[in-house]
Image: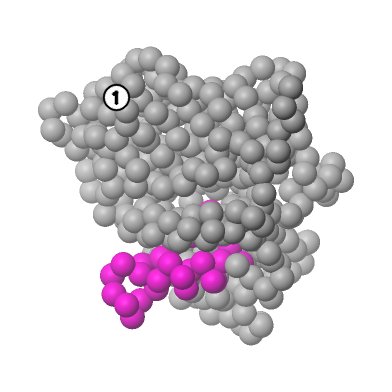
Amino acid sequence: MNQPSQLPRSGFGSLVLIAAVLGGGAAAFAYTAGWLSPHRLTPEKMVEALTPPGVDPLGHRRNHAKGICFTGVFESNGNGVPLSTARVFAAGRYPALGRFNLGTPNPGAADGTVRVRGMGLLISSDDGREWRTAMINPPVFPVSTPQAFYGLLHASGSKDPNAMKAFAAANPEIAAFADWAKTAPWTASYAEEPYHGLNSFIFTDGGGNDHAVRWALEPAAQPVPISQDELEKRGPNYLEKEIAERVRDTGPQRWNMVVTVADPGDQTADPSKAWPQGRRTVTVGTLIVQRIEAERNGPCRDINFDPTVLPPGIRVSDDPFPAARSSVYRKSYDLRTAEAKDYPRTEVAKP
């Protein structure tokens, strides 16, 4: 079975690349459709598929297991008010906390072996509401349905040399993700990555009108391409070290939140397909990361970045993934909290 965080060198072909990126849970999210019937997927089955043999995630998230916490603010500019009544879009500054992470179930994975990077984010508005979201750096998801994602996990971990070829033939939408995995540049900093929401949601404005949207965070930091070999040479935990030093030494890091508004007729159920170019975009504010803290004792440790936790003015669309992710996130949360002894907090020395 492919190790979840390892990437092949050139010469293995695009299907092997996909298997290495996604095998054992290195893709963005944990999805399931178990709420539909007992004969379909369950959170338990998906969690099992996400955790490959030889990986010990006890006390950790079952995917995106390696991460580091941050706190800061979301500075809303008011441009989102015509789209949604959510209080977070009114001009102002709102507390934010989150987690930079790697798309792997292995909390000990080396940074240079994991292709997918993510950000979990929670923004609290002054009406007591929360907006939670989980985003990743690829611009599309590899497959179009939760069932296909489950199939991908099994195909990528199969000993059958033809498993991935057969899966790709049955799910040709995976080609767009494979192209990103092969050609997109690596960077040496979480601060230089864009983070895409991928799933479609519905914003409702003050007049009761609905707007199908997707959102993304675009970095203010200029991305500096680096080879995978060079990143590996910088050490297995370089990304956490780098973001902590960057914020400490150069100041807060920023991302603009850009909301893309669908045109009438644009599909909203399939995150493997990007919307056509030219759709209206609205920059609704800026995420400002002000402080970095290790996860073990950090404020993000016990946060479940459930994408269905939404304030009034935002709701899920016909995209099945957010509800599916929610069910698996709950299962993962229950497991890791029951295993807290396996990932103990560090006692802070008293003054």
Q: Assign the N terminus to one quadrant of the image.
A: bottom right
The amino acid on which the numbered mark 1 sits, given as a three-letter code, is: Asp
Q: Assign the C terminus to one quadrant of the image.
A: top right
For the magenta stretch, what is the residue range?
Answer: 24-50
When asked about the image quadrant of residue 288, the answer is: top right
Query: In the figure, is residue 113 to the left or right of 63?
Result: right
When asked about the image quadrant of residue 277, the answer is: top left
Residue 36: x %, y % from top left? 28, 70
Q: In the image as oriented, which residue stretches furthest toward the bottom?
A: 160
Q: In the image as oriented, which residue stretches furthest toward the right?
A: 233
Q: Choose between 258 and 61: the one closer to the eye.
A: 61
Residue 309: x %, y % from top left? 35, 43
Q: Choose between 265 and 209: the one closer to the eye.
A: 209
Q: In the image as oriented, which residue stretches furthest toward the front?
A: 350
> From the viewer's perspective, is residue 342 above or below residue 248?
below
Name the residue carrying label 1. 127
- In the rendered image, residue 35 lying in the magenta stretch gets the answer yes
Residue at horizontal 55 percent and vertical 39 percent from the top: 300
Q: Is residue 194 visible?
A: no
